[in-house]
Amino acid sequence: MRCLPVEARKFLGYRIENKGTLRIARQSIERFKDKIRAITKRNRGKSLEEVIRELNTLLPGWMQYFKYAACEGVIEELDGWIRRKLRCYKLKQLKRSKTVATMLIQRGIAKASAWCVATSGKGWWRLSLTSQMHKAMGIGWWRLKGFISLCEIFESL
């Protein structure tokens, strides 16, 4: 029987490196992303507040379980990805160019820039990465909506 090296094994969702540091196993991250995808699925018909509530129940428990892993970079990457999923969810709820542009203008984006994004032929996922969306729906805006980010949870542990 062939033995796997230590870093190729996973144990309880963790991966142990040669120097003894704990990391989150790739499979655990993929399962976590699948749960986030299920919650933020754009055709669910749930309000943004309900989606945020569901995420706020999932994220702290997941972070609490993996608090011993050296994973700052992974957490920041996942946090940004989750916010992008939420921006995409919000854009899908707005549906039309006029409502997207109105929301962007209300959030302080220049009128021409807001209309440029709103009338773009790109999909919701692609639009959720634009700088206008980042500015309009920044971290502070998500805090006001009640979303607790992974980075905040990680820092509080």
Image (tube, helix red, strand yellow):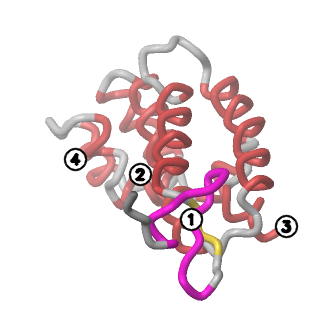
Mark 2–mark 4 Cα distance, whole angstroms, equals 12 Å
User: Looking at the image, is mark 2 or mark 4 earlier in the sequence?
Assistant: 4
**Residue pictured at 36% horizontal, 38% vertical:** 101
Query: Quick one: SS at disc 3?
Result: helix
User: Looking at the image, is mark 4 or mark 3 earlier in the sequence?
Assistant: 4
Residue 97 — which label? none
Residue 15 — which label? 1
Residue 64 lies left or right of residue 130; in this view the side is right
Residue 32 lies left or right of residue 98; in this view the side is right
The residue where tag 2 is placed is 133
Query: Mark 4 against mark 3, which lies toward the viewer?
Result: 3
User: Looking at the image, is mark 3 or mark 1 earlier in the sequence?
Assistant: 1
**Residue pictured at 31% horizontal, 40% vertical:** 125
Q: Categorize mark 1 by other alpha carbons within 10 Å: few (<14), some (14-19), many (20+).
A: many
Q: Residue furthest left?
A: 121
Query: Quick one: SS at disc 4?
Result: helix
Query: Mark 1 against mark 4, which lies toward the viewer?
Result: 1
Amino acid carrying mark 4 in the image? Cys
The residue where tag 4 is placed is 116
Amino acid carrying mark 2 in the image? Met
Query: Mark 3 against mark 1, which lies toward the viewer?
Result: 1
Mark 3–mark 1 Cα distance, whole angstroms, equals 23 Å
Query: Mark 1 against mark 2, which lies toward the viewer?
Result: 1
Residue 156 — which label? 3
**Residue pictured at 68% horizontal, 28% vertical:** 49
Residue 53 lies left or right of residue 79; in this view the side is right
Q: Categorize mark 3 by other alpha carbons within 10 Å: few (<14), some (14-19), many (20+).
A: few
Question: Is 13 within the magenta?
Answer: yes
Q: Is residue 19 above or below residue 5?
A: below
Instruction: Choose between 64 and 122: the one closer to the eye.
Output: 64
